[in-house]
Amino acid sequence: MKKTILKERSSLLAYAENKKTFLIYRDIPIYFLILPSFILILIFSYIPMYGAVIAFKDFSPGLGILKSKWVGLEHFSTFINDPYFWTVVKNTLKINILSLIFGFPAPIILALLLNEMGCVKFKKIVQTVTYLPYFISWVVVASIIYTITSPESGLINVVITHLGYEPIYFMGEVKYFVPIVIISGIWKGVGMNSIYYIAAISSIDQQLYEAACLEGCGRIRQTIHITLPGLRNIISVMLVLQLGSLASIGFDNIFLLQNSLIYRASDVISTYTYRLGLVDMEYSITTAIGLVQSIINFIMIITSNKLVAKISGWSLW
């Protein structure tokens, strides 16, 4: 009896081992497909992490990383004690928070409106018109904004002067910069970001809507009680990702729209580090700023994930 049990056990182990070997060989083509992405991540994401040591050294390109003088936390103390740095941080947080408040709901609202459209042709036209700005370079977008807001021949100022008011130099006044950045960001990204929500809406079981119709629910109640709960997971993912980048901001749109007249309101961490690192060649300080920024983003994404998990009951991990 014992011999029979041992024989069956050994045969089961052999079968499991053969199956495991089969699965490994079967998945080899998939491993080769993943390999280029893994190599790119390794080269551009993990190997450059070694360069973070520059933040703790008085880096000199002539001496290299290893031979440069070790200064510890001196560069961290330098930018923390710099009053202008905190102005830059305030501008970054201000633009990001306002973008979150006004920009985050925009693609959700657009997706809900597109879902309610009955005319397929008009729906496709609206989708095309809203998607196109995403593929326009920020250089072109900045040129369009400068042309539209020009105090001499801009469309907005032409309307203002026809109404009997004085033209406004929008790009030269501090109070207009943040609204322009937020509006241009929404205009450029709302169409593409709405794709995620449209895809999530299309995966909702249509029988739920049919049952709601039989119960006498209108379109508004269906949206509140069926569509929005169906978007809970994707909303949670997008919210966590956006909150996780609260301490950083895109470089292109800010850099192309700012000028010397509005530096106090338009200078953010990315443009500040650009000037320090590439213009003034302060490599160590900019590395220290980037390291602190990455740590803050890491903490933010973990914290926001836990908060979203408590609120919505679903999280990224």
Image: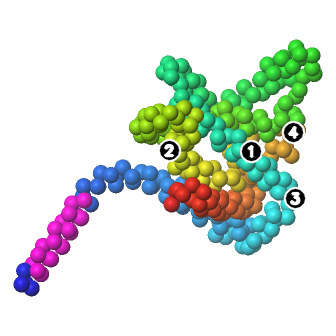
Whole-number angstrom distance, CA of label 4 to CA of label 3: 19 Å
Q: Where on the picture, by quarter, is residue 57? A: bottom right
Amino acid type shown at disc 1: Leu
Q: Residue at x 73, y 60 (%)?
A: 289
Q: Is residue 294 visible?
A: no
Earlier residue among tags 4 and 3: 3
Quick one: quadrant of the N terminus? bottom left
Earlier residue among tags 3 and 1: 3
Q: Residue at x 39, y 54 (%)?
A: 35
Give the numbered dot on residue 230.
2
Disc 4: which residue = 174
Disc 3: which residue = 83
Whole-number angstrom distance, CA of label 4 to CA of label 2: 41 Å
- Judge whether residue 226 is colored magenta: no
Whole-number angstrom distance, CA of label 1 to CA of label 2: 26 Å
Mark 2 vs mark 3, foreground winner is 2
Q: Residues within 10 Å of mark 3 (few under 14, many from 20)?
A: few
Horizontal and vertical percent for residue 170? Answer: 85, 30
Horizontal and vertical percent for residue 249? Answer: 69, 48
Amino acid type shown at disc 3: Pro
Mark 3 vs mark 1, foreground winner is 1
Q: Say whether marks 3 and 1 touch (CB < 8 Å).
A: no
Mark 4 element type: helix
Amino acid type shown at disc 4: Val
Residue at the extreme top of the image, as rendered = 162
Q: Say whether marks 2 and 3 touch (CB < 8 Å).
A: no
Disc 1: which residue = 98
Residue at the extreme front of the image, as rendered = 215
Out of 304 and 32, give the one closest to the viewer.
Answer: 304
Mark 3 element type: helix
State the extent of the magenta-drawn residues as a range.
5-23
Q: Is residue 112 above or below residue 63?
A: above
